[in-house]
Amino acid sequence: MIDTHTHLYDEAFTEDFPQALKRAVDAGVEHMVFPGIDSSVHTRMTECAAEAGDMVSTAVGLHPTSVGENWKAELDFVEKRLAEGGWSAVGEIGLDRHWSDTFFKEQVEVFRKQMIWASEEGLPVIIHVRDAHDTVFEVLEALADAGTVMRGVFHAFSGSIETYRRIRRCGDFLIGIGGVVTYKNAGVAVTIRDIPLEEIVLETDSPWLPPVPHRGRRNEPAYLGLIAAKIAGIKNIPVATVDKVTTAAAKKLFNLY
C-alpha cells in the first residue's frame, strides 16, 4: 500500500518517528508521500524523508491556512524550492475558509499560481479544500478553459458523486480517501460506491483523521490497511484488489516507478 498523504514529520511524531515508520512497514505500507505546508516545517519534513530513505517522496507547496501577511515571501519560498527539482508533487495547496477568510483573496491567488507552476513543471498537485469548493472550481475551470493541463489528487475527499464528476471534468484528478470513510454515516462511504477503484488513492493524513477504531487518538500510516479494508467492504471486493489498484494509481500519479 501507499500512503499518499501523511505528515509523519509532524511534531506529534517527534518522540517515535523511527518506531512509527517501522509500524507502517510492518502493516504493509511500502511508500509514503509527505506533503509540504510552508517554510516553517520544510526542514523537518526533508530531514525525516532523508531518514526514511527510498520509502518517502516529498512535495512542496503553500497550504491555504498558512497564507497570511507574509504570503508573498512564502510563495517565493515555494518557487525557489520548485526550481531545485526532485519533488513528487506541488502541495498541499488549495482553499480553506473554515478557520478564517481574512486572507481568502490571497489564498485564491496563491492557489492559482501554484496550479500553474505545477502544470509548467509537469507535476501533480495535492489539493486541500474546506468550505470553499465553489471557488476552487472557479479557479480550476478557468485554468482548464485556458488550456492548462492539470492532474493530481483531491485530498481528504468527502463530497458527492456530482462533485466527483465535476472534479474529473477539470483534469486528470484522483480521489484521496482516508479515515473519514470509516466513520458512522460518512457520506463519502456512499459516494465511493460509484467511483471507479482506479481513480482512488489511499491516505491517512496522519496525525489527523484517524480511522475507526482509533478515533480520538493520533493517526499514523500503520492504520492505512483499515481504510483499504473499509473500501473493500463497500465495493465488495478483496482487500488485496484495493491494495493493488490504488498502489498502481499512486505510483503513476506521483511518478514512483
Image (cartoon, grey):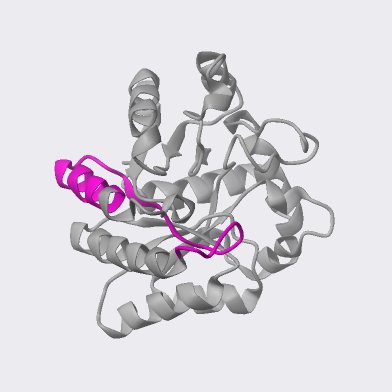
> What residue is rendered at 58% in x and 32% in y?
221
Q: Is residue 87 magenta?
A: yes
**Residue reaching furthest to the right:** 184
Apparent side of residue 65 relative to residue 145 in the rendered image (left or right): right
- Image coords of residue 241 (percent x, y): 60, 48
Please state, as top left, top right, bottom left or bottom right, where the C terminus lies in the image. Answer: top left
Describe residue 223's horizontal placement relative to residue 136 as left or right: right
Q: In this view, does 168 lie above or below 40?
A: below
Residue 99 placement (x, y as % from top left): 60, 56
The one nearer the camera, 102 or 2, is 102
Residue 238 visible = no
149 relative to 6 in the view: left or right = left
Farthest bottom residue in view: 145
Please state which of residues 192 and 69 is positioned toward the viewer in this rendering.
Answer: 69
Q: Where is residue 82 in the image (x, y as percent from the top left)?
A: 21, 47
> Residue 106 location, x and y as percent?
38, 65
Residue 236 against residue 57 in the figure, above or below: below
Counting labels gives 0
What is the magenta range? 74-103
Is residue 172 at all visible to an observer of this figure? yes
Query: Dividing the picture into quarters, in which one does residue 165 lie?
Result: bottom right
Splitting the image into 4 quarters, where does residue 153 fall?
A: bottom left
Residue drawn at x 66%, y 73% is 160
Residue lying at 35% horizontally and 34% vertically, measured from the top left: 42
Is residue 105 covered in magenta?
no
Name the residue at 27% across, 59% down: 118
